[in-house]
Image (cartoon, helix red, strand yellow):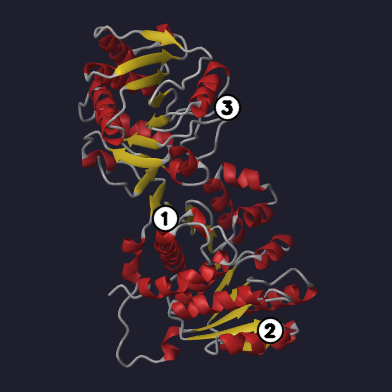
Amino acid sequence: MGTMPYNLYRAAQIRKLDHIAIKDYGIPGETLMERAGAAAYDLLRHRWPQAKRICVLCGVGNNGGDGFVVARLAHEGGLEVNVLQTGKRNILKGAALNAAQAMGETGLETLPFTSQALDSYEVIVDALLGTGLDREVEGEWRMAIEAINRANSAVLAVDIPSGLHADSGRVLGDAVRADMTITFIGMKQGMLTGYGPDYCGEILFNDLQVPADVYEQLSPSAVRIVYDHEKYHLKPRPRAAHKGLFGHLLVIGGDHGMAGAVRMAGEAALRSGAGLVSIATRAPHAAAISAVRPELMAHGIEAGTDLRAAVDRATVIAAGPGLGRSTWAQSMLDTVIEARKPAVLDADALNLLAENPVKRDNWILTPHPGEAARLLKTSTAAVQSDRFAAVRSIQHEYGGVCVLKGAGSLIDDGNDPLSLCSAGNPGMASGGMGDVLTGVIAGLLAQGMKPVNAARLAVCVHAEAGDRVATAGERGILATDLFPFIQRLVNPY
C-alpha cells in the first residue's frame, strides 16, 4: 500500500492515466485489474483477519472486474464467499469478463442481486460502480446500495464507494458508506472533500505499480497540502528583530454581544506571530478585551469615519468576526474597501459583500458553505454538491484568494491546481473556529507572506492544531484550545 498521494485527479484524468499505462507502457488491463483485486483482498485479510464469510457485490464494468478478482482470491484463501451481480452479466467485456471467467473456473458462482438482506456476512465488498458514475443511482443499483448500508457488516469499497461522484464528492441519490476504501492509480479529488470523507471511511491508496513517468504526462486537478510541506514558509527570525518587522494587523468586528469573535481572531493573529494587533470594535467591548488580553490594542469605534486613522496605521486588515449586518457594520466594511489595503474578509463581512459585490486582487475571502452560497446567490446544497466549482466561481467573481472552509477545505488563487487540506476533524465544528482561522491567516499575511501562501499555511496550521487537540477526543473542543498548538506549529525550527 502506498502513502496518500499529494496529486489529486478527476475521473477523466484517472482514465487517461490508465490508458497511458496500458497503451504507452505495455501494462495489460488484466494485469492492472489483477493487482487491484489482490490489493483489495490483502487489505480485507489484514483489516478483518477473523472474517470467514464475505459477500462481494459486483457491477458490469471494470469495478466489478476488480470485485471478481477479490472473490476468487477469497475463495482460494478458504473464505466462504457469495458473489452477487447487478446489471446484465452478458454485457461484461474485456478484462472484467476475463476476471469473471477466471473466478468461475474455481467453481465460484455468481448470483443475481435481489432485495435480499446482507446481514449474514462479516464483510461486504462494494465493487458495484466505479469512477465513471455521473448520474443518480436508481433501480437495482440503488437497492444494492441501500442493502449494503442496512447490513450490520463491515464494508470495504473498491476504488470508490458506489454512488459517490469522483470529481465533486456529492452523493448521487445514495452511496455506500464504507468503513474503508482502497483506491487505485490516482487519488480522486471528490473523496477528500464535502461528503466524500464520510462515505469513504479510512482511505488507502495503491498505484498498482504504474510507473512514475506516467504521472509526469498529466497535471493534477488539485493538490493535497499538508503542514509538513507548507511550514517551510516559516523562517527563523533575526536576532535583531523588532515588532515593526512583523506587521500591524487591524481586526474589525464585535458588534453588540459578539466581542468574543473579534478577540479570538486578534489573539490568534498574535499567536501566529503578528507584530502588533489592534482591535476596532464597539466601544463597550474595548475595555473588556484589553482587560483579558492586554496585548491587543482595543479601540471603541462607533462610525466608519472614526475608523480611518486605525486603518491608515495598519498594514493588513481583517474584517468580519462578530461584525453583524447593522448600519455600523456596513460603515466599517465600506471604510475597509475604500482603503484598498491587503485584507482578510470573513463571516458577516462576506455576507455584506454578497449584497454589494466588489472584486479585489489583494484580499483573502474565507467563506463557509452558507456564506459561499450567499456570495454566489445559490443554495448551500448547491455549494456542497461541487465545492471545487464553488471555490473557483467565488475567486473568479470576487478576485484575490478564496478559502472554502469545511471538510476538505479548498483554496483557489485563480491558478491551477487548486489546493485541498484533508486534515482537521469534526470536533472543530464549534463556535469561534472560523474566527481563529481568520486570525491565523491575517497574522501570517501581516508578516509579509504572499496571500496564497498565507492562506495555505494557515489552513494547514489550523487543521493540524485541531487534530492535536482532538487526541483527547473530538467532542467538546473549544476554539481557544488551539492557541498553544498554533504557537508551536508556527515555530517548526
Work out whether 87 lies above or below 200: above
The reply, left or right, for residue 407 in relation to residue 234 is right
Local crowd at mark 2 within 10 Å, few (<14), some, or many (≥20)?
Answer: many
> Looking at the rendering, in which quadrant would you find the N terminus?
top left
Which amino acid is tagged 2?
A: His
Q: Which mark is residue 24?
A: none
Look at the numbered disc 2 and give the secondary structure of its residue.
Answer: helix
At horizontal 36% and vertical 58% (from top left) the residue drawn is: 226
Q: Earlier in the sequence, mark 2 or mark 1?
A: 2
- Residue that carries the numbered disc 1 in the rendered image: 423
- Residue 140 position, x and y percent, is 54, 16
Q: Position of residue 282 (x, y in %)?
A: 71, 82
Mark 2 or mark 3: which is in front?
A: 2
Q: Residue at x 41, y 9 (%)?
A: 111
Q: Residues within 10 Å of mark 3 (few under 14, many from 20)?
A: some
Distance Cα–Cα, label 2 vs label 1 = 34 Å
Which picture quadrant has residue 375? bottom right
Kind of residue sitting beneath label 3: Glu
Which residue does the numbered mark 2 point to in the structure image?
Answer: 285
Question: Which residue is under mark 3?
Answer: 136
Contact between marks 2 and 3 (CB within 8 A): the answer is: no
**Is 396 placed above or below 482 here?**
above
Three-letter amino acid code at the position of disc 1: Ala
The quadrant in which the C terminus is found is bottom left
